[in-house]
Amino acid sequence: MPIVWEYCEVENPIGFVAGRIASARIFKADGSHRTVDGEFGQLVARLGQDGWEIATAAMHNGLGSAGQHAVTYLLKRPAP
């Protein structure tokens, strides 16, 4: 039987917005999702304890003086 995955997208603002809260969007195998906010280090530690692993990451550069720079992490874990 193939593995069914759940996915989690974590966005961590960086640069002049450092110190802001990171957001995690958790996508369940059934299509439902929820958002969890928290301090980046604590949020990632909790996700790791819950069995999530990083699949990839990408940096996004904001545009203009009001732009926001961020790193987005995509995590995955087998669905329970």
Image (cartoon, rainbow, N blue to C red):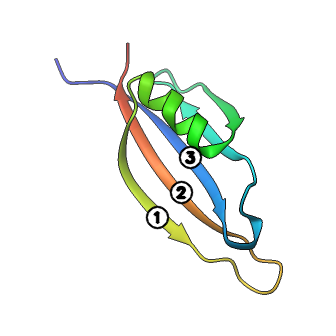
Q: Is residue 1 above or below residue 21?
A: above
Q: From this viewpoint, which residue is outermost toward the top? A: 80
Q: In the rendering, which numbered label is found on residue 21? A: none
For marks 1 and 2, the one nearer the N-term is 1
Location of residue 29 (image quadrant)? top left
Which element is circle 2 on?
strand
Residue 4, x across and y down, in percent: 31, 24
Q: How many marks?
A: 3
Q: Quadrant of residue 25?
A: top right
Q: Which residue is mark 3?
A: 10
* Structural crowding at the residue carrying mark 3, measured as other residues with C-alpha within 10 Å and reported as few (<14), some (14–19) or many (≥20): many
How far apart, in angstroms, are the residues tagged by discs 1 and 2? 5 Å
Q: Residue at x 76, y 77 (%)?
A: 67
Q: Quadrant of residue 62?
A: bottom right
Q: Which residue position holds label 2? A: 72
Counting residues from the N terminus, which is met first, the one under dot 3 or under dot 1? 3
Which amino acid, mark 1? Ala
Residue 33 left/right relative to 50: right
- Which dot marks residue 58? 1
From the top left corner, tell me how far across and down residue 36 is, in percent.
Answer: 68, 32
Give the spatial CA distance, label 3 vs label 1: 11 Å
In percent of the image, x 61 and y 39: which residue is there? 24
Q: Amino acid at mark 3?
A: Val
Residue drawn at (57%, 42%), measured in percent from left and top? 41
- Looking at the rendered image, the quarter that the N terminus falls into is top left
Dot 1 and dot 2 residues touching (CB under 8 Å): yes
Query: In this picture, is 71 found above or below 30?
Result: below
Q: Quadrant of the C terminus?
A: top left
